[in-house]
Amino acid sequence: VEWVAAQPWCNGSVAAWGPSALGRAVLRTAAAAPLPLVCGVPVVCHMGHFFEDFYEGGVLEEAHAQAVDMLGFSMTDRIRAAADPRDPFWIEGAGESRPADLDLPLLFVTGWYDLGTARTLRFHEEVRRLGGERARAFSRLLVGPWHHTGIDQGRQGQVRYPAAAGEAARETRRFLDHWLRRRRARDEELPALVRWYQMGEDRWFEAPHWPPGGVGPRIFRFGASGCLAEGDPGPAGERRFVSDPADPVPTVGGANLPLGLKVGPFDQRAVEARPDVLIYSTEPLAEPVRLAGAPAVTVTGFSDHADPHVAVRLCDVTPEGRSLLVADSIVRVVAGRPGTPFTVPVVLPPVAQTFGPGHRIRLSLCGSNHPRFARHEGTATVTVLHGGGAKTELALPTLKR
């Protein structure tokens, strides 16, 4: 950085920009605080590495780990060996996250279909809270409908997002013009503290923080009939799915790296047609539902296996019938022994999606999502309980605007 600043073609100010591993280099360089570095733009990244980066709900993110190896980082064996969040590998990795060492304006850029969106959002808030004076005052966050290698592309998966095309480049140019080229903008011309793309509306929203103010939970209960209802879901009942490791439910899109897998929103109807997948859907919506935050699913049931997996997919069903993936997650249930009742939370990644009038909100439950997540080693029959005293429901953080 100092060498660049001393060149005759440089005005003495330097910025750092980079995605993924290069974004981590941006943050590490910023933490070293070379004097000519005036700002940075870390894209789809955060500092440090954490258990949750590779074990979602206690289940190995198999495709992610393999992709990291394919990119030359050779970490899969170490990640598999560190299946306990208390492993020194994760303690050391968490220690590499040093938001307090950052003291310059940073523009964080990520997308709703990135693998690490939740961690990036959390790290941005840590910088705003713990960083130096300039980092706290001038750091910004931009979240589009993008996946890890699809920043600025107007098409993600099977969906077009016209207003998102090129937005990160435009925002970055404004940011760099202000801090690097010393073309100081008025305060009202600077990017908002947080700007995000509301999928389903093709609109950008802004707020002083994430999640935004005015968000409250809407509870949708699962019915034994397959309904998803804010009111009474019907009489108590049971539904079952069988998880067979020899025939796992396949990954079709989502927050993946595009190394042999589809990425972003894809139609899930082929997945939902399988006999080992339970489907729950609302009636067509009369008014829009604006999701802005991390959806949470609670599943009550029991299994003939001590520690089954429960995989969750949240979809937006269009009036034409396409069931487009919004977010997914998984959890390894630790019930103690077969047949023991469990109530387990499954927190999905943060996302901003508007389910429009005439659309339906759909949630599916099954035992796998492979190879995005490692398959369960044994065959398990999971019984899901509905109604009565069973708490089986979806909590959607919704924005009232």
Image (spheres, helix red, strand yellow):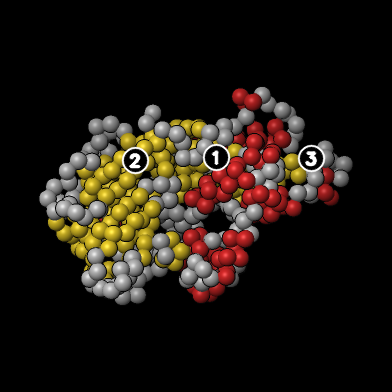
Q: Which mark is residue 142?
A: 1
Q: Which residue type carries mark 2?
A: Pro
The quarter of the image holding the C terminus is: top left
Which secondary structure, mark 3?
Answer: loop
Foreground label between 2 and 1:
2
The disc, 2 or 1, on the residue closer to the chain's N-terminal end is 1
Residue pictured at 52% horizontal, 52% vertical: 119
The disc, 3 or 2, on the residue closer to the chain's N-terminal end is 3
Contact, mark 1 vs mark 3 (Cβ under 8 Å): no
Give the residue furthest to the front.
389
The disc, 1 or 3, on the residue closer to the chain's N-terminal end is 3
User: Which percent across, then down, holds residue 392?
Assistant: 25, 53
| Residue indicated by mark 2 | 217
Between the residue at mark 3 and the residue at mark 2, the CA separation in whole angstroms equals 46 Å
Question: Within the image, what quadrant is residue 273 found in?
Answer: bottom left
Which secondary structure, mark 1?
Answer: strand
Contact, mark 2 vs mark 1 (Cβ under 8 Å): no
| Residue indicated by mark 3 | 13
